[in-house]
Amino acid sequence: METKQGQGEMLPSPSRRKENHKQEGPRITREKRTVLLMLRIYCHHHHTPELNPHSENHSEQCGLCPSCAELLAYAWKRLTYCRFGEHKTTCERCAVHCYKQDKRDAIKLVMREVGPKMLVKHPIVALRHVWDNLRAPEGGK
């Protein structure tokens, strides 16, 4: 592996950092599940005609219409490569906004509308998300 010397430590070269930055621990997995559950609720309320299980437009993998499935894939990719990994706070409190503006607006709309419904439909998931939001970001971020 190609490395750079930096103040007595060996650091991976920039070309190798991205590949080593993939995050798949329990915190990231929980966050991905939360986003999936929120998008399912949102999609069910807003895109019901597209959500027919026998429809061509229905994504069999996650139970979402194509536009919600696209937003889910985008969110999961961002979580997979989150620079804070298992030490992250919620995206809302993060100092680094890695979403494109249109995707950020879309996910904010979903969360604003579905957040209260999560307390009824998935109370434990919702409370863990609130707890994660209260958690101080590491490194002052």
Image (cartoon, helix red, strand yellow):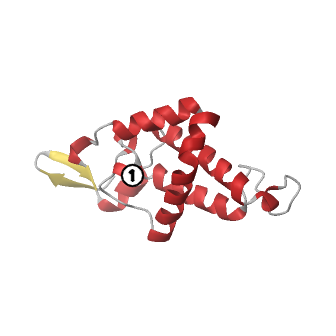
Measuring 40% from the left and 45% from the top, which residue is drawn there?
Answer: 90
Above or below, 2 against 123 in this view is below
Residue 67 percent location from the top left of the image: 66, 65
Q: Is residue 83 visible?
A: no
Q: Residue furthest left?
A: 7
Extreme right residue here?
A: 54
* Residue 131 shows up from this direction: yes
Residue ranking furthest to the top:
124
Q: Position of residue 95 (x, y in %)?
A: 29, 55
Q: Position of residue 97 (x, y in %)?
A: 36, 60
How many numbered markers are drawn? 1
Q: Amino acid at mark 1?
A: Glu
On screen, 11 above or below 28?
A: below
Q: Position of residue 115 (x, y in %)?
A: 53, 45
Residue appearing at x 78%, y 57% in the figure: 48
Q: Secondary structure at mark 1?
A: helix
How crowded pointer 1 is (Cα within 10 Å; few <14, some 14-19, many 20+) is rated as few
Viewer-proximal residue, 24 or 140? Answer: 140
Q: Nearer the viewer, residue 51 or 116?
A: 116
Q: Nearer the viewer, residue 81 or 133?
A: 133
The residue that label 1 is drawn on is 92
Q: At 59% across and 55% down in the image, what residue appears?
A: 72
